[in-house]
Image (tube, rainbow, N blue to C red):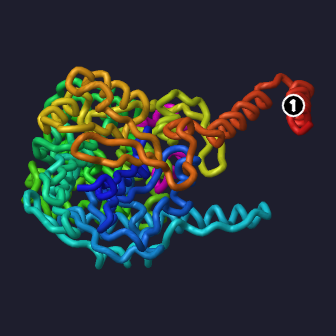
Amino acid sequence: MDRDQHPVLRFHGATRCVTGSCYEIETPHWRILIDCGLFQGSKSERELNYGAFPFPPDAIDAVILTHAHIDHSGLLPKLVRHGFRGPIYATAATIDLCSVMLPDAAHIQETEVDHLNRRNAQRGRPLVEPIYRQEDAVACMPLFRGAKYGDWMTVAEGLRVRFWNAGHLLGSSSVELEIDGGGTSPMRIVFSGDIGPGHKLLQTDPQGPTGADYLVCEATYGNRDRPDVSPDRRRSMLGDVVRGAARAKGPLIVPSFAVERTQELLVDLHLLMQTGEVPRAPIFVDSPLATRASAIFQRHADEIENGDVLRQALISAELRFTDTVEQSKAINRLTGFFVVIAASGMCDAGRIRHHLKANLWRKNATVMMAGYQVQGSLGRILLDGARRVRIQGEEIEVRANVTLFDLYSGHADAAELMAWILARGPVGQSLFLTHGEEEGLAGLGERLKGSFPEGNIIKPQLDDGFRLSPEGCLPVEINHARRLKPENVGRLDWHNDLSRLLLDVSEAVNSAADERGRAKIIRQMQRALAAQGD
């Protein structure tokens, strides 16, 4: 194969951060994407969702989707809106989940943009458009094509694809690509997707092929080893948190990903209440998406581990699925101990923000983060110990007990990632580490150093590209300006700094002893701003 015939792999997301997963492979005959996900986290990264794709959407021949989580699937409707008409290959369960998750993402965007535009109109600022609308999400669904684990499919000329169970989420996959070598051995590239941990309540252990030429692997928890906790031990530890909330006689608020994390929590809460290990109390699932996703999990219960227990949990007497906004608001008029599970899991959108506004200031409230909190998200800011936060333009004092319970994570930890990578060997050429912040990438890279030749572990930056050959890979020139400076990816940005400054100024002014002290602080700020203007 001539050099110009070798495929080029480009990294359009999930580089030095854990969202926006999107990889492009181009040959002279076709262009495909692996995932097309939404960016989350800092406002600078979220703004990438509104910009143009770094490729022409109508030039993409197909999309291979590893799983339904929004950071992997969430820009598919935008891709269709801007001209993509090819097939989207995914497992049947992933297609079912996308049928509710993508319209829900569109609804959240439309709702939040409506609220923003009302504020913009009052302030004389220009109105904005959502990233996409619900009709774009609906237009996606006829493009999906079902795939079965273990079956090879021809996706384009000289390209075969096979899905492996990644053990991360219902329907989640690692993806194996086989590219015709034009008379030589085919090139094999494996994309991990998100790898599930051991002891995952509803999933089997992750699988995958061996002997790839190139491996692209996530590193979300690349620097972290979790305790080896069995499902029974995890349930017992959850019981400690629940009993603590009950003793405080206040609500237990759980920001949770609506798909799978919520269902896992419901199983364990159901079992704890059934056995009397924690007090019986109402459990509110305040997420229309979680409600619809739970119905999909019921339909697929025979395909997942502990499916019978999940069915029982979903019809338990304590469980209440809320639907309307009025029902959601009514929850916060209750007193005493109860449980609320609401999306989003990182507290950046959805109904959870209303529950946080209503409860963060209460000393008897408990907020339990049940998963990874990306840098710049409200969930991460709370875990980092913020005393005051801004939610929907309002300042909220944080007096609640905020805790992290990360034993429901859908991601393998460092030891499990290393074991999965080594089980894929021998890797003929390079390992690309993605879907991790700097600490995760560095930690996993250090562990793997002795298992790969020097220079064969690559940590790409946003929009980097590499030409892949049987002898190795070489960087290619980026054919457009980088959409975000590397130093601004996976970091707090100026929007976070501004929010912190506004909170600090407000606290300083309110803490001043008298009117004279407050006026002095304000004059100092005014002089500083005037000096900056000069």
Kindly identify which residue carries mark 1: 528
Residue at the (17%, 60%) spot, across then down: 182
Horizontal relation, residue 110 to residue 157: left or right: right
Does dot 1 land on a helix, a strand or a loop?
Answer: helix
Res. 19 visible in picture:
no
Would you identify the image quadrant in which residue 470 lies? top left
Does the magenta run of residues contain 351? yes
Q: Position of residue 115 (x, y in %)?
A: 62, 63
* Direction front: furthest residue: 2
Residue at the (45%, 32%) spot, across then down: 402
Does the magenta run of residues contain 144? no
Residue type at mark 1: give it: Ala
Quadrant of the image for the N terminus? bottom left
**Closer to the camera, 243 or 92?**
92
Res. 273 visible in picture:
yes
Residue interval drawn in magenta: 349-368
**Closer to the camera, 333 or 219?**
219
Residue at the (17%, 41%) spot, across then down: 200
Residue at the (47%, 39%) spot, across then down: 379
Residue 73 drawn above or below residue 401: below
